[in-house]
Amino acid sequence: MEKFFNIAGPNDPEDHYMLDPLRRIDYGETSGLIDHKQYFVLHAPRQTGKTTSLLAMVKEINGQGKYHCAYVNVETAQTARNDVKRGIWAILSRLESSFRHFLKRELSHMPTETIDRKGPDTALVAALEEFCVSLEKPLVLFVDEIDALIGDTLVSVLRQFRDGYSLRPKRAPLSVILCGVRDVRDYRIHMSDGDIITGGSCFNVKAESLRLGNFSQEEIRELYEQHTTATGQIFEENIYPAVWDLTQGQPWLVNALAHQATFEMPEGRDRSRPVTTEMIEE
């Protein structure tokens, strides 16, 4: 099957033209923070390749064999808002699925049982403690869409990660990476009692805040030339400065323009015809 320019969801190297996600995320810097047992933040705008990069790191870390690594998306807990019990149950449920998928391991207890035993304000740190104790290697945990959480649920999650910080690496994750659109220090959290607190006060163990940026002009060319190599269809040279002017390297826009020009426009589907600047502008 011919690859295509992805405009929906994480990239799959079997299906999509893509840049090396570990290079985009500066894996060397990130892995150094993990080795130093840091809890930190990775943030990026939507549709920039964040989830693709996270999943690539999980695969790389597990492949190296030094740590166990898992990815969990906590967006399902967004609707819990200030209902901490409901929010923590949703997150524990997603963790249960994540550990089963990435590590072929199970939580020691079902989410409801853990909440009943420990209460919602300590259930997350307790579940992670029991899980980490059962592992023969330290755990690295990527938590995606953290800023989808709202109010008391977000406060509880951040504080429970902070509570576990002193227990690492034997009884808590060696490293926790919070991933979202915004930096945790920019969160303004509205609690159920009306108080407003900032994210940093809840997660003051944050060591670094890394940002995933846009494509460079050279990376746009590298991405588009993958299509030329695969199909023989060329892009006119003037396309590259035009795409840069139109997108400033925003990854979704870069992919969307190429997708429209090579798969949606009838003339672009003819691989014997070059992709022109006029097609990109249209």
Image (spheres, grey):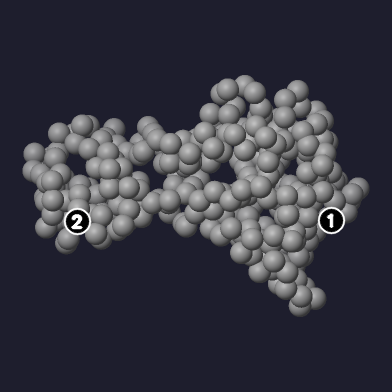
Disc ID at residue 159: none
Q: Residue at 89% of width from left, 49% of height from top? A: 118
Q: Residue at 82% of width from left, 39% of height from top? A: 167
Q: Residue at 53% of width from left, 58% of height from top? A: 181
Q: Name above or below for residue 45 compared with residue 216.
A: below
Closer to viewer: mark 1 or mark 2: 2
Q: In x, y percent, where is residue 30?
A: 56, 38
Q: In x, y percent, where is residue 148?
A: 61, 60
Q: Name above or below for residue 266 compared with residue 58.
A: below
- Name the secondary structure under disc 2: helix
Residue 92 in sight from this viewpoint? yes
Is residue 161 toward the left or the right of residue 17 in the image? right
Q: Name above or below for residue 90 compared with residue 33.
A: below
User: Residue under circle 2?
Assistant: 242
Q: Quadrant of residue 218?
A: top left
User: Residue under circle 1?
Assistant: 121
66 or 232: nearer the eye? Answer: 66
Whole-angstrom CA distance, mark 1 to mark 2, is 52 Å
- Name the secondary structure under disc 1: helix
Is residue 82 toward the left or the right of residue 179 in the image? right
Disc with the residue nearer the chain's start (1 vs 2): 1
**Kind of residue indicated by mark 1:** Asp
Q: Residue at 54% of width from left, 30% of height from top? A: 59
**Kind of residue indicated by mark 2:** Ala
Q: Dot 1: few (<14), some (14–19), or many (≥20) neighbours within 10 Å?
A: some
Q: Quadrant of residue 229?
A: top left
Q: Dot 2: few (<14), some (14–19), or many (≥20) neighbours within 10 Å?
A: some
